[in-house]
Image: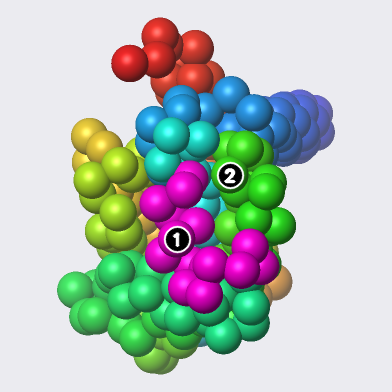
Amino acid sequence: MTTARRSSRSSSLAALAAGLFAAGLAALAAAPVSAHRLDEYLQAARIAVDPARVQIELDLTPGIAVAHGIVAEIDRDRNGVVAAGEGQAYAERVLGEIQLEVDGRLLPVELAGQRFPAVPAMLSGEGTIQLQLTATVPPLADGPHRVRYRNAHHSDVGVYLANALVPASARVMVLTQTRDRDQRELVIDYELRAGAGNRPPWWGPAAVAGATVLAAAALWRWLRAPQS
């Protein structure tokens, strides 16, 4: 009887965590499109930690007041179109201003994919640049580890968000997420567990989901704040 009750409670809590996580991601994904501040460059990172790699999804959305300057940096020939080479050059510039460490060891980060919106969309404040970044993690022993992410791109007008995703691997348990005041830096403490068949207990996804909801709530408060 006790076992059945515990199993039911764990299943319910896991389902609640999944729901919270989905709601948080929806808020993060939907809110910046049309409501972010006009004079800032919103940069939102979602970070996935796996045993052998760290993957970063980075969305860059310039507000109308700064979009012309950002577009000028990308569209170097001023023809109103982001050519493949121009997009690659800008993505590599962003890449050079991203730092990623695992256990204090600086890892090389590579560009895995990129998508640039049409120039008119960027100039209207509704175009989002999407970059996929990846870094290979050297073999690690089971136990506690730490990922440190830092974004220094356009610190003059940048506004930053950073959040860890629920790990796809059962071997990875995210324990805590710590951000600096501006969210330019995110520290993810996680545990690497033996045995790929071991599923994380309910509180692992719940902790990450809770952090996601908190980040979404902070974003919503920021979006609702009066524009300067």
Q: Quadrant of residue 195?
A: bottom right
Decide if residue 116 is in sight here: yes
Residue bounds of the magenta highlight:
67-81
Q: Is 81 positioned to the left or the right of 225 in the image?
A: right
In the image, residue 76 lies in the stretch drawn in magenta: yes
The residue type indicated by label 2 comes to Leu
- SS type, badge 1: helix
* Disc 1 residue type (three-letter): Ala
Horizontal and vertical percent for residue 130?
A: 61, 61
Count of labels shown?
2
Q: Nearer the viewer, residue 204 or 29?
A: 29
Instruction: Report the residue at 38% width, 90% height from top.
Output: 138
* Residue that extends furthest to the left in the rendered view of this protein: 104
- Quarter where residue 73 is shown: bottom left
Residue shown at 39%/36% (left/top)? Answer: 40
Q: Nearer the viewer, residue 8 or 179?
A: 179
Q: For residue 123, which numbered disc appears in the image?
A: 2
Write down the residue under mark 1: 72
Residue 34 percent location from the top left of the image? 64, 28
- Would you say the residues marked 1 and 2 are in contact, meaning their CB atoms lie under 8 Å apart? no
Mark toward the start of the polypeptide (1 vs 2): 1
Label 1 CA crowd tier, 10 Å (few <14, some 14–19, many 20+)? few
Of 146 and 212, nearer the camera is 212
Across and down, in percent, residue 82 comes to: 62, 70
